[in-house]
Amino acid sequence: MTTSTALPPAPVPPVSPGQRSKKQVPHNVRTSRRAAWIFAPSLLVSFVFVYVFIGITVYISLSNWKIGTSPDLTLRQPFGGTYGEIIQEQRFQADIRNVVIFTIIFLVLAIFGGLIAALFIHHVSVGKGLFRTVFLLPYALSFIVTGVAWRWIFSPSTGVNEILRSIGIENPPGWTTDTTILGALNDPSGTDFLKVQFGIPVALLPIIFAAAWQLVGFAMAMYLAGLASIPEEHLEAASVDGANTWQRLRHIVLPQLWPSTITCFVLLLHVALKIFDLVVAMSGSGPGFVTDVPGIYIYNYLTSRYDKASAMAIILLLLTLAVIVPYLIRGYRKERKA
Amino acid sequence: MRASNKLRTSLAITAAASLIAVTGCSANQPAGSSTGGTDKLEITSWWTSGSEADALNVLIDGVKQSKAGLSVDNAAVSGGGGANARQALAARLQAGSPPDSWQLHPAGQLKSYVDGGQVADLTELWTQNDWASKLPKDVAEAQQVDGKYYTVPIGVHRGNVLWTNPAVLSKANVKINPTGTVDELIASLKQVQATGTTPVCLGDKDIFASAELLESIIMSRTGADNWKKLFTNEYSFDAPEVKQALEDYKTILSLSNKDHSAITWDEAVKKMANGTCAVSLMGDWAYGELLNAKKTPGTDFAWVTFPGKEDIFDYVGDGFSIPAKNIPHADAANAWLKTLMDPKIQTEFAAKKGSIPAVTNADISSLSEYQQEAAKSFASAKVVSSLAHGQVTTAEFAQTYADAVSTFNGSGNVAAFTASMTQAQKTQL
């Protein structure tokens, strides 16, 4: 927490308003004590409602609270038995497979899409505002709204399949109802530990596409800001030295956009891991859980198994932390160096 | 001085924000609980659709008539087949501020509330009014846990009804015999397929629709007694009859619309009535839905009991319980339970809901042809409870079943299905 930057100006010896600048605010004990008081309520609230509740969820996931209506908070034997139980479930394994596939493809699509859209808008000479709005508009909508629209588009009997049929394709794809797993790595028997086929579930692709469509505008906005901050002289100098468009892009523009890419990556990553509403609206769990995600799992078990729902919530939290923490550590190290 | 003014402003904003947070929390308290008095009643349910809300209003008007000056707070929570309502209720029960009465399915779902010590023992009320004698034995038993009554039944739905499209069936020259076997049914469906029409409409976006279809086939193959034994662990999901039912289910699934996992049950029955396919299995709440969609019974759609070796009535019941502790308005809640058991009220309720009255002395002559048939069948058929609706056993087991069906829909792996269900029989019953 860098409280000093967010401090209101402390009472200082009277100065004329024009002279007031950041440098004149003394970072003394009095001001930081005041700052602590101001931030105390929000710190307390976030401590209770975030960290204490995470702790409670961890505890429930280790407890015997098996039925939603009657809390049984004794610890389950063997310790952590719920986790052992769920990792052997076909549904859980399918969820982890789905969320990993979803995250990877979604990030690639949204970030590349955003980059291309931003480069296009940055270099187009007319209608910049129009294009910006067109790309950014989906971001303003809620997932549940776009989910309903995309559900109709990819529904096996309407939408794109109507068009496919009209051009003579007899058996158009089932889209979100397809149970095929592309590039399946194993053949589960149902009694082994691995109960799910690892690979890319075809039914997930339309949903990933819809999610990327919605958030490509966000990535574009990030990249547009990044592009605007590249000094014009660098590009001019490169042109004078005889660099062509591709060389300028590769050696000047893309390296300077790296911070935007990192920001996009982190901010979109948690969208992918937490995805729930879009999937519910488009396909639900799907046959054989081909489109099930941890969010739906948690929701389904909230009235029948509190321990399982909590354990899945904790696993989801760990998944997020596994990617966010290295990023935070890297940022922290950089800050200390600076 | 400007700076300290700013400080004061930010402090004031922080204070206001925390005040809002605090009042926001207290606003979660149930409406009406603070005012007290005996002239109030709060009920929760998941009856929010058009016909359900109308039916609930029959009950509310009824209790108002029996207790003049009573104001009723209808705290219904919509969505998720009751999952949202049960969530909201669980939160209130844990906070110690329950409503005066809430809707639930009897038997298995009731048991979880009894185990949690959350529902009041109504045995005294039952014996005082001699309710057990006014109900069929199966219904009365479903309201008990360990010999004590905890809930009051308001209506009875049937889960295993095969809704048919007469025009499509006659075009294929097919007649479905309710006393025939599952094999005969499959043969008829294949005959429909030969005419180029999809035989079965299924909408299992919410998995209970295919869970109910599979449950009907299992019942037909195993018979009512073995179905009941599945939940006392005296009969195994590994039995050859269950495996045969799974193979049948796989066949019927292959005869269904390919987009079944993308549509809901009500879309599926409407497709059936529009002639997209020949049959659709669904509980008899579909009857209300079809009437609502302006379809005429007899011409647009007809019905048969799901074929099988004996006449089985797959019972899906609705009832109300009252809390064991912290009941805000006990008198009004008692009046409410008595109103529910009034035969006239049950008939009026059924007319809106599409169910049949639970009490045997209700006059059903004013109800529809389907409901009269269902009532007759309920009196004569073997009554079993639904697993797809979590009535026959615990919510945990029902969720395991729903997951197993979902998995089976994707893989068609009989061994995996029976493995996970026999495992659940060992650990969850």
Image: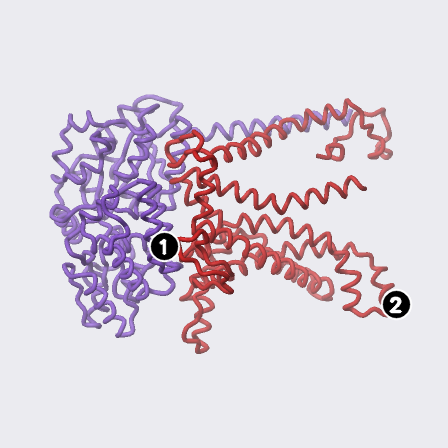
Quarter of the image with the C terminus of chain A in it: top right
Q: Which chain has been coloured purple in this picture? A: B
Could you say which is closer to the camera, residue B166 or residue A73? Answer: A73
Q: Is residue B200 left or right of residue B131?
A: right
Q: Amino acid at mark 1?
A: Ala
Q: Amino acid at mark 2?
A: Val
Q: Secondary structure at mark 1?
A: helix
Q: How is the image coloured?
A: by chain
Q: Is residue B348 left or right of residue A148?
A: left
Q: Residues within 10 Å of mark 2 (few under 14, many from 20)?
A: few
Please name the residue that numbered disc 2 is placed on.
Answer: A240
State the image quarter where residue A227 is shown.
Answer: bottom right
Left or right of B181, for residue B282: right
State the residue position of label 1.
B416
x and y percentages locating residue B137 in the rendered image: 14, 39
**Above or below, comparing residue A240 to residue B42 in the picture:** below
- If the image is split into quadrants, where does the N terminus of chain A sit? top right
